[in-house]
Image (cartoon, rainbow, N blue to C red):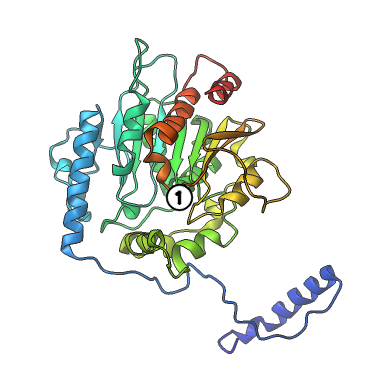
Amino acid sequence: MEDCDSTYDDELEEYVEKLEELLGRRLEPGRGDAKCLRMTLDKVEMLHRSLTWYLCIFVVDTIASTYLLYHSFSFHRTSISQFFTTFPLRPLSLVTPCKSPAKGLTYWHRPHTSKTRLPILFIHGIGVGLYPYINFLADINAHDGADGDIGIIAVEILSVSSRITCQAMLKQEICEEINRILSSHGWKSCVLVSHSYGSVVAAQLLRDPMICMNIGPVMFIDPVSFLLHLPDVAYNFICRRPSHPNEHLLSYFGSKDIGIAHTLFRRFFWADSLLWKEDLQDRPAAVALASRDSIIDTKSIRAYLVGSKDWAQSPTKETGEILIDGKLDVIWFEDLDHGQAFDHKTTTRLRLVGTVRAFCNETASPEVAVEEVRKK
């Protein structure tokens, strides 16, 4: 407390007095050692990476690009003048004929040829870009018939993809960029699918009056935006001292990366990224949660989403079980950690793919699409 600015003492005392009135008792003096998490003010904790590490990222990016091209995706680059603003360099930017209508966002696009279903806007999470999601994106169109393919736009957020690049965009800028992308492809409505940190961007899109009207059903996988005002995400991802193997991996390869750390400490504002059920605006939605998630408190989020008064209750549902609260479905995956739902094709990934495909079904009303998901 000796470092506190004394000019705020009177204001703080007033807050304490009001709190004492609400509690009906006086607060005893104490010497607590609790410290607040001031993400935008505290020192940015990060570790430098070797050239070997970035060579590995280059290889992973090349493999991901090859697979996406194989699955009929086309890469949309930014201006050639921005080629040297990202490291490792991306040679594909020099040869692709497709240019992004956005100034700073690159993305992968699969043409939408279906006349009866909605296309998909996908936003990835923190990690190494789109590589972990290749099979998921490919499975969406694995069994299409004569109706044509479901179009997909997979936006790349390079600032959280283990690269040295420009700083992350703030809310208004990224909403405008994504709106330009959707408009350039003539998408007037789409299914919004996000994973982990992607739910932050999804929350910003749902709150933006310019673009929210173009968003139909939404699918959240391991979302960090629900109950973001609680300390779990900030503490588990940034401040926790790792003690288990998965926590060490998360700390070293995730939160300590230069771009990721800067994004979370200086470009992440919880008030812009927080998502409430009311923000879904009565649109069909599904949320997939893992019981052993090491970043978010999935038990509390699950209880909040299904309207339970007991946020600390222990889920007893089987893997893939769907809990229903109006138009909002919660898919519970037992014994899985953050992001592992994409790794198991037969038990979890196909469940996610089936949910997304059902939401794309424009021939049925939104209510019918939700019922189709619940029957799977």
Q: Nearer the viewer, residue 101 or 134?
A: 134
- The structure residue drawn at horizontal position 78% and vertical position 79%, both measured from the top left corner, is 27
Q: Nearer the viewer, residue 28 or 315?
A: 315
Q: Nearer the viewer, residue 324 or 283?
A: 324
Question: Residue 118's x, y, as percent?
Answer: 44, 23
- The structure residue drawn at horizontal position 22% and vertical position 55%, both measured from the top left corner, is 85
Question: Callout 1: helix, strand or loop?
Answer: loop
Question: Residue 113's x, y, as percent?
Answer: 34, 17
On screen, residue 153 above or below 186: below
Of all residues, the one furthest to the top in this rendering is 146
On screen, residue 324 above or below 204: above
Q: Is residue 164 visible?
A: yes
Of all residues, the one furthest to the bottom in this rendering is 2
On screen, residue 107 above or below 291: above
Is residue 162 shown left or right of residue 370?
Answer: left
On screen, residue 155 above or below 36: above
Q: Which quarter of the figure is the N terminus placed in?
A: bottom right
Is residue 126 shown left or right of residue 328?
Answer: left
For label 1, count other residues whose C-alpha is less than 10 Å away and answer few (under 14), some (14-19) or many (20+).
some
Q: Nearer the viewer, residue 285 or 250?
A: 250
Q: Is residue 185 visible?
A: no
Is residue 94 shown left or right of residue 337?
Answer: left
Q: Amino acid at mark 1?
A: Asp
- The structure residue drawn at horizontal position 57% and vertical position 62%, both measured from the top left corner, is 231
- The structure residue drawn at horizontal position 48% and vertical position 56%, both measured from the top left corner, is 295
* Number of callouts: 1
Question: Residue 91's x, y, as percent?
Answer: 14, 45
Question: Residue 24's x, y, as percent?
Answer: 86, 71
The residue at which mark 1 appears reads as 337
